[in-house]
Image (cartoon, helix red, strand yellow):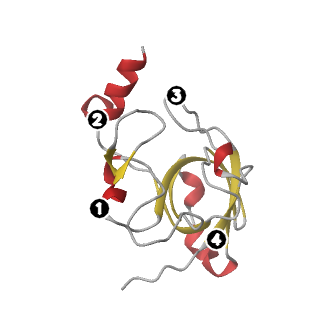
Amino acid sequence: MFTSQPIGFVRSPYTDTGQIPKGLGAKHEADGVLKILPEFEPGLTDIEGFSHLIVIWEFDRAPREELRGKDLLASPPSDNRQHGVFATRSPRRPNPIGLTTVELLAREGIDLHVRGVNMLDGTPILDIKPYLSSIPSEKLRRGWLAEAEARQK
């Protein structure tokens, strides 16, 4: 069994999930700070060389009741149809893990100033990885989201 240990916490302008942009065309442009705990500072060595970071975090305020079969379907704000939870970014998941790509603006010691936060203030950070992709954009598919966007036009 895996037990998570936060490496830091998010400072964000969002204190309520209703404040976070959602749905088709939602832009995540809010600035925030990834406040890393002092004991993990050596792990930040050379991070400032990367433009973007993948932040793995915990949905620490999502409902924790045991999931039932119907909970494996989600109705995202960007579509009026249900989709499998693994095809969405719903916070109701078997494991309450979130993933966000942010732009690294600056590092000040243990504080990483970033743009693109979509987490609540105080959210536990589980890990950070530099964003690296060798997949050309023309090979990426957007699945049901592309279909939902086309229906909106």
* Residue with the most extreme left position: 139
Residue that label 4 marks = 8
Please give the name of the residue rendered at 61% of the width and 54% of the height, measured from the top-left corner.
119
Separation of residues labelled 4 and 3 (CA atoms): 29 Å
* Residue with the most extreme top position: 153
Q: Is residue 49 visible?
A: yes
Q: Residues within 10 Å of mark 1 (few under 14, many from 20)?
A: few
Q: Residues within 10 Å of mark 3 (few under 14, many from 20)?
A: few
The mark that comes first in sequence, 1 or 2, is 1
Separation of residues labelled 1 and 2 (CA atoms): 22 Å
Q: Amino acid at mark 4?
A: Gly
Helix, strand or loop at label 1? It is helix
Is 23 in front, or is 117? 23
- The spot of residue 81 in percent (x, y) is 35, 36
The mark that comes first in sequence, 4 or 1, is 4
- 89 on left or right of 31: left
The mark that comes first in sequence, 4 or 3, is 4
Q: Amino acid at mark 3?
A: Gly
Residue that label 1 marks = 69
Residue that label 3 marks = 25
Is 25 in front, or is 78? 78
Residue that label 2 marks = 143
Is 44 in front, or is 12? 12
Separation of residues labelled 4 and 1 (CA atoms): 33 Å
How many callouts does the rendering have? 4
Q: Residues within 10 Å of mark 2 (few under 14, many from 20)?
A: few
Separation of residues labelled 3 and 1 (CA atoms): 30 Å
Helix, strand or loop at label 3? It is loop
Please give the name of the residue rendered at 64% of the width and 71% of the height, measured from the top-left corner.
8
7 shown above or below 119: below
Question: Can you tell which of label 3 and label 1 is closer to the viewer?
Answer: 1
- The spot of residue 30 in percent (x, y) is 68, 42
